[in-house]
Amino acid sequence: MNDRMPTITECHIERTILRTLYYFELFSYPLTEQEILRFAHNLKGDAESIPSEAVLQEKLRSLEEEGKLFRFGEYFQTRNTPEWVGQRQDNNSRADAMLPIARRIAGLIDAFPFVRAVFVSGSLSKHSMRPDSDIDFFIITEPERLWLARTLLVAFKKLFLFNSHKYFCVNYFIDTEHLEIEEKNLFTATEVVTLLPMYGKEWCQAFLGANAWAFHQFPQMPRRSMKDVPPQKQGVLKRTLEYLLSGRFGNWLDQLTLRITVGFWKRKFRHFDDPTFNIALKSRRYVSKHHPMYFQDKVLRHMESKV
């Protein structure tokens, strides 16, 4: 029998492994060893809590023996629910099928006026798609034209896609002068480091550079390759519309669409108090976030209860 007391570093490593698995527990999503290592969270700068691969393997065996986690094949999770593995594999296969569709739609979005870069976000950016999941897009726009660009995209979805969210969910916009994400927490850091760049190589790189804080929290997470990311589209129609909507007229339209949209959301989501509305439906001239399910709060509350 080994009565040796664990060191502070060993305790930190155990907490880091369990925190990582608890995060994905909310999504019923087991992780492999390599995924646990990549998503190991450098909480408040405690770099000693990030294990090496050899230490990780040893600690996973120890935690499994203690009944603190469960292993099914190559996957680890915090609950004894083996069906999660099959669900995950189905979601991964569905993501493989959806990715080419997402790439084509991202190209369409990039052709719209004032769009400068397009990322895939949400579950697909993490290589997972449930049967009811949407393809989510994170979009960077020209300054002072964000709401105009958003309105054109939403109008296109309503008129030509019958308001379908399945393949065309444009729920987060920022502009090129405000690339750094203002809310800095575990949820937003996870979303930033898993964004999948699709178009606008220059601004995709600038965005990741402006949000180095997120990668600091995940020191083992590799950055997405930009090798095959094309630059933003510069078609004749896009350039023409940007020219016609420049100047004071475009500025007035952008502010008008902001007021109309926020007014509609205030009526539709009147059950939100002001603090909740300002986070879940953040609406400034330089940012638009449409997350009425307020999943960020659900995730952070889950983590707080676990940790």
Image (cartoon, rainbow, N blue to C red):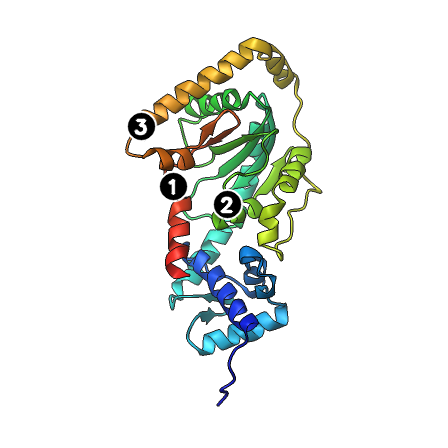
Q: Amino acid at mark 3?
A: Lys
In percent of width and height, residue 6 lies at 52, 78
Marks 1 and 2 close (CB-CB < 8 Å)? no
Residue 42 image-quadrant placement: bottom right
Q: Nearer the viewer, residue 197 or 58?
A: 58
CA neighbours of label 3 inside 10 A, class few (<14), some (14 to 19), many (20+)? few
Which residue is disc 3 drawn over? Answer: 268
Residue at point 53%, 46% (across, down): 125
Residue at point 51%, 71% (across, down): 11
Which residue is disc 1 drawn over? Answer: 294
Number of residue marks: 3
Which disc, if any, is residue 147?
Answer: none
In the rendered image, the quadrant that contains the C terminus is bottom left
Q: Amino acid at mark 2?
A: Thr
Q: Is residue 230 visible?
A: no
Closer to the N terminus: mark 1 or mark 3?
3
Closer to the N terminus: mark 1 or mark 2?
2
Residue at point 63%, 39% (across, down): 210
Residue 192 image-quadrant placement: top right
Position of 130 with respect to 214 (left or right) is left
**What distance separates the C-alpha of mark 2 from that of mark 3?**
25 Å
Q: Nearer the viewer, residue 92 or 126?
A: 126
**What distance separates the C-alpha of mark 1 from that of mark 2?**
12 Å
- Disc 2 versus disc 3: nearer the observer: 2
Which residue is disc 2 drawn over? Answer: 188
Q: Amino acid at mark 1?
A: Tyr
In percent of width and height, residue 198 lies at 61, 37
Residue 294 against residue 168 in the figure, above or below: below
